[in-house]
Amino acid sequence: MSEPAGRADRLAARVAEREIDRLLVTNLVNVAWLTGFTGTNGACLVEPGRHLFLTDFRYAERAAEIEGWEVEIVTGEWLKGVAAALAGRVGVEDGHVTLRDYGRLRELAGDEVEVVPAGGDVEDLRRVKDPAEIEAVAAAAELTDSIYLELIERGLTGRTEEEVARYAVARMREMGAEPSFPPIVASGPNGASPHAEPGPREIGLGELVTIDMGSRLDGYCSDCTRTFATGPEGGLDDRAGGIYEVTLAANLAGLEATRAGALGSEVDAVARKLIADAGHGDRFGHGLGHGVGLEIHEAPRLGPRSEDELRTGEIVTVEPGIYLPGETGVRIEDMVVVGAEGVARNFSTVPKALTFVA
Ligand code: ZN
Ligand code: ZN
């Protein structure tokens, strides 16, 4: 991975606005985003005019390839080496550093150095994707969609949930990807649980089957959910068919409301209202969506309490669901790029009209 240009400078500009001299970045996802480094031990110390990358001897060669960063190889105790590089008032990622490391870092850095909590800036910068990141997510989504089409082609009835999930994961690996999270395959009454784990249940006829899966390719994640009906067309009971149509309408309304400037809570409310109006308000127990990037769940959030204001270039999911305990469930999830006027691009190409699968 080459050095992602400009990211450290943008972070340094944020540091300059805060009451700290430099920021110590230790969350490895943030380190990877800043430097392209994907090893298991590294940290960044960022301030205006200086970008220092620290790692240990195992990564000396890889570290030398990171452009635009001064590199320091720590020998001996890692935290001691990191502490030795600190000076002045140093912010640390308080959402990530353990209490133990925080205490140890303060102790090792000595009285001259002030270590203060100052996390969140990298996560915030990561929200808006650059064109290369958008293409990386698009490739992961395309790969996942091709597996959805294979699942439709192979049929679901008579297979166990586990078998369907295993097949999907195997296909991802054959195509050079990894699952971005363990796939969910929830059939019949299992669909009533949003986080159902695939089990030994054999998928029957005339059921709804919710499949939620994504790939990770070149570090970037994708996320998509489709709910299918099994058996011949028309073989689904009206109640299941009804909640499918309401969920689909909520998905479309949520997409319609997704645009730069909208609050996460506002987009959520638009979709949630349709589900509530249909009498299922208490059966949609999770937020409408989340950001996707290097992590499967990242900022911003779309949910009833989210004050995140959407920005152009963010990648978010829109995934309403209705879950009827003991009966069945539906979730429909698209992953999109936020644009100034609305959705700039929808990565999820698998059809959303209720599809009957053999
Ligand atoms: Zn999902
Ligand atoms: Zn999701």
Image (cartoon, rainbow, N blue to C red):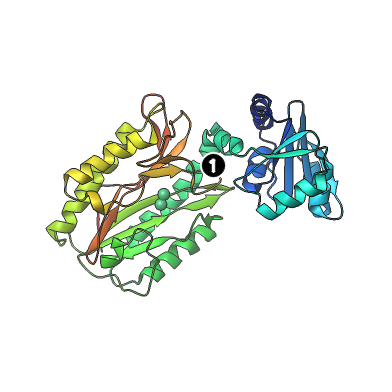
Percent x, y for residue 199?
38, 72
Q: In the rendered image, which residue does mark 1 sit on?
A: 136
What residue lies at 56% left-to-right and 45% top-to-bottom? 294
Percent x, y for residue 287?
36, 46
Left or right: 3, with 272 as reference point: right
Task: Please state, as top left, top right, bottom left or bottom right, where the C terminus lies in the image.
Answer: bottom left
What residue lies at 39% left-to-right and 36% top-to-bottom? 264
Secondary structure beneath dot 1 equals helix
What residue lies at 44% left-to-right and 52% top-to-bottom? 144
Quarter of the rendering containing residue 338 = top left
Residue at the far front in the pictured view: 111
Task: Please state, as top left, top right, bottom left or bottom right, where the N terminus lies in the image.
Answer: top right
What residue lies at 15% left-to-right and 57% top-to-bottom? 239
Left or right: 337, with 59 as reference point: left
Percent x, y for residue 135?
52, 38
Label 1 packing within 10 angstroms: few (<14), some (14-19), many (20+): many
Left or right: 152, with 297 as reference point: left
Percent x, y for residue 252?
27, 39
- Residue type at mark 1: give it: Ala
